Image (cartoon, coloured by chain):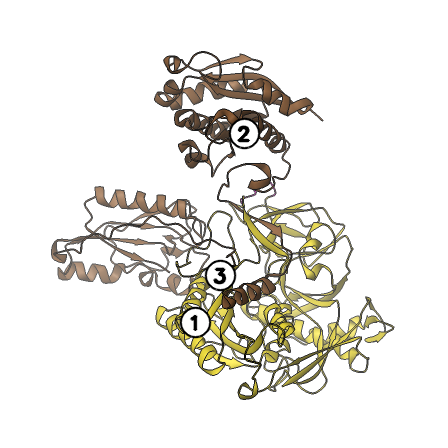
Amino acid sequence: MKKIRVVHYLNQFFAQIGSEDKADVGPEIRDGLIGPGRALQHALGDNGEIVATAFCGDNYFAEHQEATIDELIGRMAEYKPTLLVAGPAFESGRYGIACGAICDAAQQRLKIAAVAGMDEDNVGASLHRKRIYIVNSGATIARMTTTLQRMGALGIKLARRESIGKPEDEGYLPRGIKRNEFAAKPPAERAVDMLLAKLRGQAFSSEIAPPKFTGSKPAAPLRDLKSAVIALVTDGGLVPEGNPEKIEPGRPTRFTTIPISGVTSLEPEKYDAVHSGYDTAIANRDPNRLVPLDTMRDLEREGAIGKLHEIVHSTGGAHAAVENATRIGKDIANRLKAAGVTGVILTST
Amino acid sequence: MRLELGLVNITNVRFGACTEIVRDELFIDRAALIAQLEQEPLFERVEIELAHPGDSCRILRVLDVVEPRYRLNGANFPGALDPNGLVGEGETRALKDVAVVETDQFATQSRSIIDMSGPAVEYSPLCHTHNIIVVAHPKPGADKADYRLAVKRAGLKAATYVAAAARNVAPSEKRIFELPPVAANQGPKELPRIAYIFPMHSHQHPTQQNETVFYGSNIQGFMPTIVHPNEILDGGLMFSYSAFTWFAQNHPVIHELYRRHGHDLWFAGVVLTVAPVTIAEKERNTALAARLAKEVLNADGVVATKIGGGAVDTDLMMIYTRAEEMGMKAALIIMERYPDTGITFVPANVNALVTPGLTRDPITVPAVKRVIGGDTIALDNADPDNSNPGVTVIPATSELNLWMGDIAGAISQVGASRLTTYMS
């Protein structure tokens, strides 16, 4: 089997440049291994070879993150690596963030495998654990060798695109990504077992954890509707006819903006509803029932509201990942706020 | 009420001069079956194919799957196939390890497949049955929705036709499903009484006016009601979408409650309901369903499952909450769809969820020699996220990068699968 070409990333301390006084050293890359690379090379064995070691001062990385990543990724590419191993960074926050960011960039831009190492409470872990594999190193260097062994073993599997086992078996931090596995009993039997345990007051554990939401404080009610600027927003998938921006009918990552200046009613031949979670027939027959533009124009004319915002924001909300839904929501809210909108009618499906 | 399900051993299925069972082999008069199914005015022509466990064969565009059954004492699939009648009582013959698989020839974007060999067989029971496949070609101009219902009718017809051959064959095994009337259904005090609350459909995708789901009803406006579990097992229920009828006939939760009845629990009965679309209806139906379990079935605990998309998750959570407010304990079976989304509607009080698996988990199935039900599949093998569904079309014999949910029967929302999930 072909040897995996590995680049190892370290900070200035582990690259043996110096400690905190050298934290502003700029990015560099050298042939072969340095310091902890010896233990990593041992873990890789004949499966891989550390062809280069990249390093950067922690402060320099933090202060020039984008430029540093650009430079390191460019110089790494010259070594034609198939795997990037970063750290372990233990509890060092700046180093942890750098390891996470460089792994994330290598995966995306060089399309290579990447594995980082750091403590589970390292801020770099919370920033990057969803997108990259991070081996839990613990807070101190006591577990340096075992951590590098795990990073090497996991890196080999990732570089060879082999299937990756469970977090507790491979040693990485759970990324928040569910996978299937075989169960000893069928679901119906497990459900009855769980119910009986519950009835008997015995211990049981749910197989699905509730989601964690960050709460938001509702805005104060509008005092005066007659001066309010009201916007219409929907997750029901309203798009201009033919869906020119190809807004996703489910799993949204984007939203669209529909100008309604001078439009008094949403005519069915000019708009579509695209959404994988409900029967769109009625919305397509009369899009005003999805986004009540006709009624809002009446209220505007009657003076019941001050003004209707002249852009409708829309996305297809079925099966949205909470992360994307949050981002889309914030983005729309910021735009509305900047445009002077004081109230929003959200129509959902 | 007592149902005696006679399982007739079938070791092979072949075409023959007449439809009969000889020494554990089912012979099908192909021309006679085709002629029966071609009576449907929406079909231009019908093909019947066979696929056996171990074959290098793939079935495409799977719409529904039915276990061949024949009732010795009355109507088969009343309201849907035969005129009105009742099921769940008396003797029924079932062809063991045989299934009728319906394909939807309009569904060119469908990724629902059955592979008869390769890794898929580890997951779905429908890869282990001798499959009789109905490929019905629509007449030009046929309405898609009407065609779909006609195919489902054809599947019931084919299943009943082949199972009729078992009328005079001694079953190799008899299974008894018996539960007395509610008032007489009393067990020992120490056994907890367990009811099953079963939303059989979510009207987020409404049924057609002429659709036959429960005893021929389109179940629009359906209110929660007590039914005998045998009605579901014996052909009273045909799913509209999101689940295969095979799993109503072999309902995992009902089977499990029967299996443990009198051992570590007492099967109190079944509340059948639907998931409506408005909040008011959801509140009404879920509260009434829990009320029936508590006040009519006198249950101590309830298991509930769902059919449909994320919208029904809310109904399940409401059933759970109402049941616990009424003093019962509850556990839910709820399928997971996306690896990173989770189940969004889980209130803090809900702590007993079982997952039959994650549908969007990748599985690669190898190239096969033969395909049934279509030549191509809408799939981009290089795009694991399937971000442009249906844009790329490849030969259906190819190696395919699919999702677990594409393997028909691998994950059933009513609680059949070999899977659970873990956080990676």
Please state, as top left, top right, bottom left or bottom right, where the N terminus of chain B lies in the image.
bottom right
Q: Colour of chain B?
A: yellow
- Would you say A298 lies left or right of B214 here? left
Mark 3: secondary structure: loop
Residue pictured at 43% horizontal, 71% vertical = B323
Residue type for callout 1: Ala
Residue A310 inside the magenta-drawn segment: no
> Which residue is tagged 2?
A114
Residue pictured at 73% horizontal, 60% vertical = B128
Given the current orientation, which residue lies at the most extreme right position? Answer: B23
- Residues at circles 2 and 1 in contact by the CB criterion of under 8 Å: no
Distance (Cα) linking label 3 and label 1: 13 Å
Q: Are marks 2 and 1 on the same chain?
A: no
Mark 1: secondary structure: helix
Residue pictured at 67% horizontal, 23% vertical = A45
- Would you say B40 lies left or right of B26 here? left
Residue A317 in picture, x, y percent from top left? 40, 53
Going from the N terminus, do you reach mark 3 or mark 1 first? 1
> Which residue is tagged 3?
B352
Q: Colour of chain A?
A: brown
- Residues at circles 2 and 3 in contact by the CB criterion of under 8 Å: no
